[in-house]
Amino acid sequence: GDSVTQMEGPVTLSEEAFLTINCTYTATGYPSLFWYVQYPGEGLQLLLKATKADDKGSNKGFEATYRKETTSFHLEKGSVQVSDSAVYFCALSGIDSNYQLIWGAGTKLIIKP
Amino acid sequence: DTEVTQTPKHLVMGMTNKKSLKCEQHMGHRAMYWYKQKAKKPPELMFVYSYEKLSINESVPSRFSPECPNSSLLNLHLHALQPEDSALYLCASSQGRVNTGELFFGEGSRLTVL
């Protein structure tokens, strides 16, 4: 079945550092890929998405590119802020899951001033 | 209005109590979801309603009973819960019949079962 693998956290960075959170997936066909973010004490928010190969999703300075050849959707940001501290979930939606979201384990990001 | 509103934010109940969680959205979405999230884990799908009909039940124990009175409201009735049911319960909504994966989540109801 479909699955999503994320790098384990926590990831601790200093403010203004470059961020990469790795995400790889296994799926049949061409799933849609997502990054959701969960700030402390809150629900989840869609951060960005990509629906086909080579698409780049972007929002709030974050970017991720749908790489079919490496089955990856890594999240990047050029300069992180303390306010980016949160848990980041990679997810996919595809035919094998009846288009319900399959979630990665989540990566906790801690940004120190 | 792009909000999903959940009440209560916190709930403490005993194993013999009956309580309900409520969820409301006014975005015209026709699919609504209940998820359960344990600490430091991703959300687990419990139920999906599509056009006010239950379309997915992920083998959830009968002590959890969902209800969708109309397209804007979703309830989760709780009865005879166990301490291991303590978790954050998240409601979400999405447009239309086909799930695109774009869900709008509420802030959740944090449930503690004593």
Image (cartoon, coloured by chain):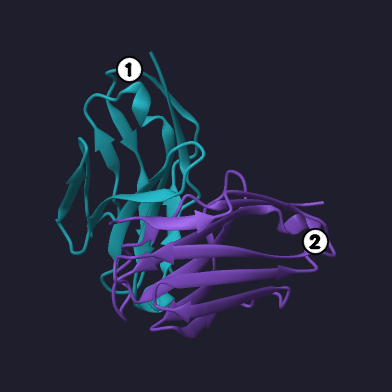
Question: Which element type, helix, strand or loop, lies under badge 2?
Answer: loop
Question: Mark 1: which amino acid?
Answer: Glu
- CA separation in Å, label 1 and label 2: 42 Å
Question: Which element type, helix, strand or loop, lies under badge 1?
Answer: loop
Residue B84: percent from left, percent from top = 76, 56
Q: Are marks 1 and 2 in contact (CB under 8 Å)?
A: no
Chain A painted colour: cyan
Q: Nearer the viewer, residue B62 or B72?
A: B72
Vertically, is B5 above or below A61? below
Chain B painted colour: purple
Residue B82: numbered disc = 2
Residue B68: percent from left, percent from top = 50, 78
Q: Residue at x 70, y 68 (%)?
A: B78
Q: Residue at x 35, y 27 (%)?
A: A83
Q: Quadrant of residue B79?
A: bottom right
Describe residue A47's horizontal placement relative to residue B108 as left or right: left
